Amino acid sequence: MKISFLRHTLLGLGALLLVACAGETEKPATASEFSVPVTYYQLDNGLKVILSRDTTAPTVIVAVYYNIGFRIEPKDRTGFAHLFEHMMFQGSENLGKMEFIKLVQQNGGVLNGSTRFDFTNYFEIVPSHKLETMLWAEADRMRGLDITQENLSNQQGVVKNEVKVNVLNQPYGGFPWLDMPQYANENWYNAHNFYGDLEDLDAANLEDVQSFFNTYYSPNNAALAVVGDFEEAEARAWIEQYFGDIPSAEIPPQPDISEPRQEEEKSFVKNDSLANKPALAVAYHMPQRNSPEYYAMGLLDQILVQGDNGLLVQKLENEKGFTSNVSGGINYLGNMFNYKGPMLWMYDLTYDNDTSQEEVLAAIEEVMSGLKDRLTQEMLDQAIVKIRSQLYDNLGGSFGLGRADLLCSFALFDDNPGRINSLEDEFRNIDLETVRKTVDEYLRPGNRTVLVTNPLLAANEKTE
């Protein structure tokens, strides 16, 4: 099992939910609604708890999300949030090194953890009758880790090797999910190397780890979701029993993570000695989360790059034949809902060596320059259908993991997992005029950053 943050989301929900219930009360669903039960409350120590029962299969998910991601990790400690994620599997008060993993796997379950922009998450999917065991185990490591120099040194080595394998020694390593934020953003918190510079990873010490744990891994900085086949009264009793007496902590004020308005287009070239053909990524700064323009960008994402009928897909793949795969989206390390700070909408592609960068950008301009006038209500309606289809695919897979992701994210960032209920309305409330205004402000050339990978391997092959 690999425990790391990934370029593509483990929980890829670029979608909306048609639901009918919120808080601790439920409304009957109409024939056109898909209903997800949601119960939300907080323990006295501040832990946010979300319960969502589904008896489709005899399994249950326990997901714990901590309101700390790599965006606000300490300066001069790049990669620290990710390093700490690894530390969470090195032992706790009652479970020794790697015993948490063995406990889950030997009971027929699967687990993982990941570090994202604004949270670090851990989850287990187990047979329903093992719910109490998983709640006990998650509470045990929230209560206290086995923080030793041996464990820290070991995981520093693991993470450094992961950086080398996944980024430094990999063709297109970090392109564009790790690279683009460093080029497009201005604020250090949004623009530093999230995976970690090797020197910074080496610099982490036991005092850093203990302080980070005491500050950010407290119950009042976390959300716990239980999704699946369980009895609610029983689950609530266990949660109170195992988590209720874990002390809360004083959470420091969040640093300023805002980004200035980008006024002029930025363009960069990154040499890649392992790449054999060029690659290009284009990014735009997103509107403020939960604003009308934010939802409009969700629709524009569908119209431009999602699916075979995406306008950029049609132009670059089918009409021009420059590439076989245009990929993109809002938040490459998650989805458009599970972040809270500044974000990029981005797409990327590789193309043949006999195609010039200028040709690719000219084809892109053909789409973007006429986009505002080309938009129709029918295109918006089709985008909503695509969003709904993505949602159902994700909610139906991984035993409800996508549902747990949305519930925890909305609890952490909005103190309202019931937001899951209003997403359909939010998208449907966006009219054509709002989408066109969003194109004017957020898809303007001055808001664009272009990053090109220069394939040195291809250049070397030509000279041999």
Image (cartoon, rainbow, N blue to C red):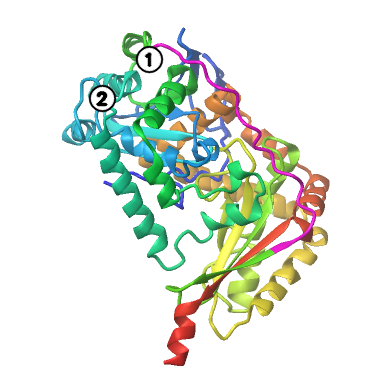
Q: Residue at x 47, y 15 (%)?
A: 249
Q: Residue at x 50, y 42 (%)?
A: 76
Q: Is residue 377 above or below residue 129?
A: below
Dominant SS type (magenta): loop
Is residue 256 in the magenta section? Answer: yes
Determine the secondary structure under disc 1.
Answer: helix
Name the disc covering residue 92, or none: 2
Q: Could you tell which of marks 2 and 1 lies nearer the N-terminus?
A: 2
Determine the secondary structure under disc 2.
Answer: loop
In the image, is 396 to the left or to the right of 124?
right
Residue that protrudes farthest toward the bottom in the picture: 464
In the image, is 457 to the left or to the right of 383?
left
Task: Provide residue 123's location: percent of width, then percent of height.
Answer: 35, 33
Q: Quadrant of residue 259?
A: top right
In the rendered image, is residue 394 in sight? yes
Amino acid type for the residue under numbered disc 1 = Glu
Say how many tags the image has.
2
Q: Quadrant of residue 422?
A: top right
Of residues 282 and 369, the one drawn nearer to the viewer in this rendering: 282
Amino acid type for the residue under numbered disc 2 = Ser
Of residues 117 and 74, the one drawn nearer to the viewer in this rendering: 74
Of residues 452 and 43, the one drawn nearer to the viewer in this rendering: 452
Q: Which residue is mark 1?
A: 232
Q: Is residue 134 above or below residue 336?
A: above
Question: What range of the chain is rendered magenta?
Answer: 247-266
Residue that protrudes farthest toward the left in the picture: 106
